[in-house]
Amino acid sequence: MKKHIYTVLIGLLGTVTISAQQFNVNADLRARFENRNGYGTLKPDTEESASFISQRTRLIFDYSFKNIKLVVSPQNVRTWGDALTNSKDDIASSFHEGYGEVAMNEKFAFKVGRQEINYDDARIFGNVDWAMQARSHDAFVLKFAPNATNKIHFGVAYNANKETNFEENYALNQYKSLQYLWYHTDFKKIGLSVLVLNNGMPYLVETEEKVDYSQTLGSRLVYKNGNLNINGAAYLQTGKLSDNSVNANYLSANVGYKFSTNLNATLGFESLSGKDQNDTSTDVKSFNPLYGTNHKFNGYMDYFYVGNHINSVGLTDVYATLEYEKNKVSAKLTPHYFASAASIYKAGEKQDNYLGTELDFTLAYKMYENVTIDAGFSQMFATTSMEVLKGGNKNAGNNWGFISLKINPNLFNYKTEVKP
């Protein structure tokens, strides 16, 4: 009899599920010195270069148990000296992320709250990690993974400036609402992504808020075979913006080859449609990369699409990248050939589309496991067309340099098994 009881007890204990409860605390501290001498736009003759140090101090609290994950990430972003040494006020703090994720079963999960949204090469959706404040969205994302090779994400967001009882609740400095659908599938050597984004931008007609929706639709394809990597993307934008019709497009292609374990090279181009400066129509013909990590593209001096160059003459960027990495050191050299996608005019006379050439050089050294030093220098060789487009002096020696220190340790890691 006792033998049977023991057998039953062992069987019951064998059905007990032991869950892992985990709590991590990570830090992200980075300080960056920059010298800007024609960064973002050509330097005017009347201006001197600017130098400063900016810093991000971020903590990431990550808790998971069973089917629930919670992430809270407070951060402080400042320029050294923007607060007095004895200041009692600090307005530079915020929450970069604060979200919960719930797995409903093996295939469905949802994520709600302040969160980064990153897809593919970060051209349309990216976290803009180069910027000290980075980018995150207040959003709801539903995830569906029917199998190991397919993913579908559906996201929605709705913004307001504050709580109100009546209509005056504008969100004019950002999108009012957005909805997107992202699908990704993997084959043996090919990865395919499709994105459909409905983006609602508000505008005022007298004191009434109106919202127009534009649509971004496109796909990205990646092919990998041994040391060869080929990728390309194409997007269309349509719909309306401030009661004006939108008709814009984007195209990119890259071919990369790894010559050895240390050396890699890439040749590529991007084309973002623009609007002729003598075009008097109200149509929006300039492609907008919206919420992408734009510093990653079109040169590190950020002349294009980093808070600028929206609804302008567009861009054609032809570039080549040479990367070398060995032990703790890596280096990258990238020349860019820039041209406008649409026509530039000065006093009614059409200008050359060629805007200039930028050389970007970066160097990184991994000092320790969680400590990295980065440095870079960029030089812009601009043309008269760039002067017409951006102002400033093309002969002012336009360049930019930086040195950055990143410290990213794990501060705390706790894991325990919990019986229900």
Image: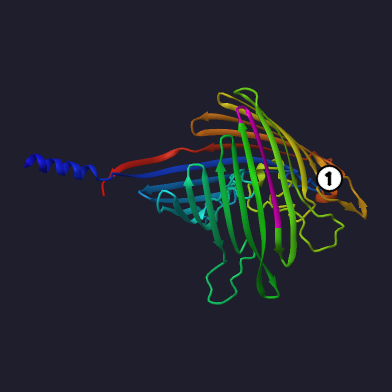
Of residues 407 and 92, the one drawn nearer to the viewer in this rendering = 407
Q: Main secondary structure of the magenta part?
A: strand
Question: Can see residue 133?
Answer: no
106 with respect to 238 (left or right): left
For badge 1, the amino acid type reads Asn
The correct choice, above or below, for 228 with respect to 193 in the image is above
Q: Which residue is mark 1?
A: 393
What residue do we see at 55% from left, 51% from top? 117
Of residues 193 and 270, the one drawn nearer to the viewer in this rendering = 193
Q: Residues within 10 Å of mark 1 (few under 14, many from 20)?
A: many
Tell me residue 35's x, y (percent).
Answer: 69, 40
Tell me residue 14's x, y (percent).
Answer: 23, 42
Magenta residues? 225-237
Tell me residue 44's x, y (percent).
Answer: 81, 47
What residue do we see at 9% from left, 39% from top? 3
Question: Can see residue 64?
Answer: yes
Q: Is residue 243 magenta?
A: no
Tell me residue 275's x, y (percent).
Answer: 81, 55
